[in-house]
Amino acid sequence: MTTAAPARTPWHLWVVGIASLLWNAFGAYDYIMSQLRDAAYLEATMGPMGMTAEEASTFLDSFPVWASALWALGVWGSVAGSVLLLVRSRHAATAFLISLVGAALSFAYQYTVELPPQMADSAMTKLMPLVIVAAVILQWWYARRMAAAGVLR
């Protein structure tokens, strides 16, 4: 009985894997700093929208536990997916899919609540969630393609 040799790792897996890990690491950093309510970070990220760190903290504190859990799932699922992609695990696609569900539902919540006035008119508030979901969809698609090609084990 012979077993098929695993497919060679294409060069683009490393490029996509490292790029996705860097992208998702920023999401993880944002999540951690937001959860810690780091005043300097919140001022730097929300200040351009006209929000103080205290106002940003109040907004974040208003999230129900389930919405915060979905946010965490979105962030950490993507980080896990990136790491799994780099170690050539077929479970990368599942991790990205879990991340996609978490992120999409978390953003759906944010689109349905009344935002602070400074955030409601911000292009970042409206567009960034779409960019993030699109990025996760592309990462999920890529991981599925690599799994189907036999690159991921």
Image: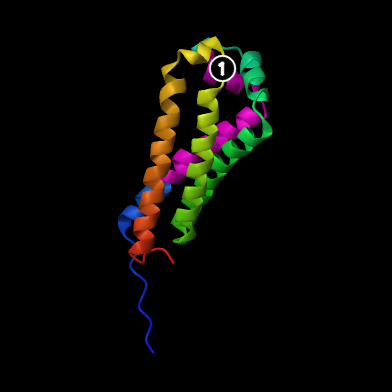
Asked whether 21 falls inside the magenta stretch, the response is yes
Q: Which residue is mark 1?
A: 114
Name the residue rendered at 51%, 31% in the picture. Answer: 107
39 left or right, relative to 102: right
| Image coords of residue 21 (percent x, y) | 46, 45
Asked whether 50 falls inside the magenta stretch, the response is no
The one of 32 and 135 positioned closer to us in this rendering? 135
144 left or right, relative to 87: left
Name the residue rendered at 35%, 49% in the picture. Answer: 15
Name the residue rendered at 45%, 61% in the picture. Answer: 90
Q: Is residue 153 above or below residue 11?
A: below
Q: Is residue 3 above or below residue 54?
A: below
**Other residues around mark 1 within 10 Å, as few (<14) / some (14–19) / many (≥20):** few
Name the residue rendered at 37%, 86% in the picture. Answer: 2
Q: Which stretch did the figure color magenta?
A: 19-48
Quarter occupied by residue 46: top right
Would you say residue 19 is visible in this rendering?
no
